[in-house]
Amino acid sequence: MHKLLILYATQTGNALDVAERLSREAERRACSVNLLSLDQYDPCLLPQEQAVIFVVSTTGQGDTPDSMKVFWRYLLQRSLGRHWLKGVPYAVFGLGDSSYQKYNFVAKKLDKRLMDLGGIAIVERGLGDDQHPSGYEASLDPWSSSLWRMLNMIKPQFLSNGPDVVIQDTILIDQPKVQITYHNSENEDSRFSSTSDLTCLSIQVGSARTVHPGKALSDRSTPGCFLKMVKNLPLTTSNCVKDVRHFEFESVSHALQYEIGDVLEILPGQDSIAVDAFIQRCNLDPDSFITVSPREMDDHNAHDSRIPVKLRTFVEYSMDVASASPRRYFFEVMSFFATAEHERERLKYFVSPEGRDDLYQYNQKERRTVLEVLEDFPSVKMPFEWLVQLVPPLKPRAFSISSSQSAHPNQVHLTVNVVSWTTPYKRKKKGLCSSWLAALDPCDGTLVPAWFHKGLLPVPAPSLPLILVGPGTGCAPFRGFLEERAVQSRTNATAPIIFFFGCCNEKGDFLYHDFWLSHSQNKGVLSEAKGGGFYVAFSRDQPQKVYVQHKMREHSKRIWNLLSEGAAVYIAGSSTKMPADVTSAFEEIISKENGVSREDAVRWIRALERCGKYHIEAWS
């Protein structure tokens, strides 16, 4: 039996979505498929495969997704040689964002490495771009057409009916991948009666997220801890276009443990009105108890190990019904359950190649939610199994920690921009997690499920000089860095820090104004007396815009002196143009102050990166 292997590495779910779509396209061409995440696959088997398709996303500043790290290390072994993959046909499709400096870096690296190991490209690698008016599908559609055509030419045994003979979808759409078991509610209601509120909540959240079949939830099931908000302070003035908040949390479950540069992930609460509206729209019983399991799993004992959970709790903690946009396949499945002809036709048009751009405008551009889409197509009666499979999972949101545990032993602080925007059709939208946090009243004692993780910014030694660049909420991790170094400086000599901060207006969004100034005076860790410095760029307080890179050029000699002394560079903030502009400013400064060419300055920074002294944490 010829099986086509499809391997994916995803961070946000897009690569999984593409891999599943290619898998469906293959099955519709009567091609048998094996679909796996890269961390489920043994890379030593690669030379034995008959054909492999890779779908990989690029995260952050050109990083591989977590699920790909072990596989990539294996592939980089010198012992593998140029003939290791001799003759193995492969194809690579990458997902990236061209506003990042290292656009689709992972797909490009993977393609080159597979070729170096002797693999044969079935088609030229495809690169999906989030910035394209139609998103990554603009390049996926033509790429997949070429893929099936070329695969049929080199391996005709895979597609016995040729590349264009497609089985009718109705045959393939009979069975969703999950099955739902309903339980006696009287037995289940008594299960939690003797447990504390906190334990009960932990079990409920953990159960809801454990029984969800989505892999995205598997390592984020039971919360690492529960936090209680103790402060919710605005950092911007009321007339400022931005709403940036300072949040302080205390642990209510166990002692906190984190380091500066770490990241806090929070599972946001969903609007209860939206959850109830979704349940009502789908004709579900919110009080029924359910377990969810993969349909292929015939072992009934495996079902028994799952704790039944109330349907409403399951929706609330694991299905993103009111903020994430559904995927293209959601519309395809909807078309089979639409009973009104005009709705069915519109849904079929949306998923056709001709309707792709209109679907992108209607769905992703407008950030239509699952609930909004279902309300727009009232004749669709989708079984709950399909909804569980296709509604995007509710994901935790990650924030850079803006405190030091040395300064605040049982607290963790966040600096959060409360996200809101207007869609192309003038619909007002809000970020789910930031809006939820901003609306929390510390007096209410709401329990916040959370997890701590290592970030991209390693902890610097007290003796390491630092050059920090953090415009806007990019200052968040550096507030923690400074708190930590201030504590260290009480007992030991510490190296100097210079910090470049940027905001729009001195009076509107000068975040933590008093904090920075207090550390830049009276021999504080940012003071010039200690070899440090604090420099602010107010971009809108004068006719010409002034950004952090302009301030860096003004102080180029100081930057070069610290770099010469072995300083480490840390950059944090918006992923758009800022990291590239700041890196370019560093290249210019090194070239000018060190009297070398721009090419040598670029090599200088690459050497800094290699020895772990040039770090970027950027977010969109």
Image (tube, rainbow, N blue to C red):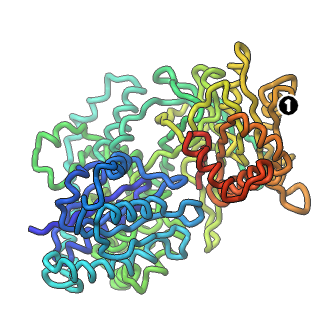
Where is residue 607 shown, x and y percent of the image? 59, 46
Q: Position of residue 235 (x, y in %)?
A: 75, 41
Taking the spot 48% from the left edge, 30% from the top edge, the residue there is: 226
Name of the residue lying farthest toward the left: 1
Q: Nearer the viewer, residue 464 or 86?
A: 86
Q: Is residue 497 left or right of residue 541?
A: left
Image height of 431 relative to 97, above or below: above
User: Residue 122 sits in which quadrant?
Assistant: bottom left
SS label for mark 1: helix
List the residue tagged with mark 1: 528
Q: Amino acid at mark 1?
A: Glu
Front position in the image: 400 or 389: 400
Which residue sits at x=66%, y=59%? 599
Residue 231 visible within the image: yes
Residue 3: which quarter of the image? bottom left
| Crowding near the residue tagged with mark 1, few <14, some 14–19, many ≥20 C-alpha atoms within 10 Å | some
